[in-house]
Amino acid sequence: MPTRRRRYRDLAELDAHLIDCRACPRLVAWREQVAREKRRAFADEEYWGRPVPGIGPSDAKLLIVGLAPAAHGGNRTGRMFTGDQSGDFLFAAMYSVGLVNQPHSVSRDDGLELFDTRITAPVHCAPPQNKPTVEERDRCARWLHAELGLLAPTVRAVLTLGQFGWQSTLRTFAELGWTVPRPAPRFGHGVSTTLVRDTTTLEVFGCYHVSQHNTYTGRLTVEMLVDVLRSAARSAGIDVEGE
Ligand code: SF4
């Protein structure tokens, strides 16, 4: 586990440091190789090729935690879930619940606005095959730790996309002094668990990841995602559309 737990004034300061991180040699090499070689469809674009920070307001009530940026999505555009089909799926669902101002997310300057919601990931650099190692996950944990610490005063619900996000979220909140039920609750689609710190509670929801593997096979449908999103938003105290 990383030992350095630097404190940041706010999310802007955290993000400014994050985008310069080069702590994982394998991921730095991969994100930069992808950015140099590019995919043919994006040959004219300049890839971001750096750590991808979270998006959304600093006083978010709902947090969505994924896995890591996609090589030709977030690693290209510089914004989480932006410019790929996983993002299309996620933002269309968020739009139908009223958590964003538009159903698509194509570039950093496309006008997307998130309402009361922030999106982040336990690993901020695109990994080969979307699979970070345990060491890379642990090295990147300091960023999630700092981000959740800054968001803790307002966040009241977390939607985790996949088991990786679920486990990282529970581990990080436990480090921040929240009581996580024992034995640790197991990930599943639609499951939820309550964390407690002093007199404050926080609900963590599980949802299958919006990966193409899950959405193409029908393991995760738009309706399933909307259902969990709506539950999480309601739990966070957000007025939800479409009820
Ligand atoms: Fe830094 Fe995280 Fe990227 Fe590793 S994965 S280089 S710790 S930002």
Image (cartoon, grey):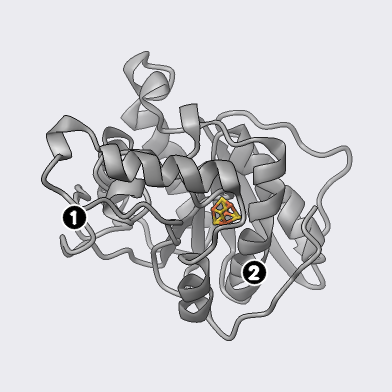
The local crowd at label 1, few if under 14, some if 14 to 19, many if 20 or more residues have their Cα within 10 Å, is some
Mark 1, ligand 1, within 8 Å: the answer is: no
Q: Is residue 179 above or below residue 223?
A: below
| Residue 66 shows in this picture | no
* 148 relative to 21 in the view: left or right: right
Tell which quarter ligand 1 is in.
bottom right
- The image's mark for residue 102 is 1
Identity, as a three-letter code, of the amino acid under mark 1: Gln
* 100 relative to 206 in the view: left or right: left
State the SS at label 1. loop
Q: Quadrant of residue 202?
A: bottom right
Q: Which residue: 58% across, 71% down?
A: 151
State the SS at label 2. helix
Q: Earlier in the sequence, mark 1 or mark 2?
A: 1
Q: Which residue: 63% across, 71% down?
A: 152
Q: Which residue: 37% across, 13% down?
A: 217
Q: Nearer the viewer, residue 176 or 97?
A: 176
- The image's mark for residue 55 is none
Residue lying furthest right:
182
* 107 relative to 176 in the view: left or right: left
Q: Quadrant of residue 30?
A: top left
Identity, as a three-letter code, of the amino acid under mark 2: Ala
Q: CA distance from mark 1 to mark 2?
A: 29 Å
Q: Nearer the viewer, residue 78 or 98?
A: 78
Where residue 14 appears, as percent x and y from the top left, is: 53, 74
Q: Which residue: 71% across, 63% down?
A: 201
Q: State the residue position of label 2.
A: 146
| Residue 150 shows in this picture | yes
Where residue 23 appears, as percent x and y from the top left, is: 61, 56
The local crowd at label 2, few if under 14, some if 14 to 19, many if 20 or more residues have their Cα within 10 Å, is many
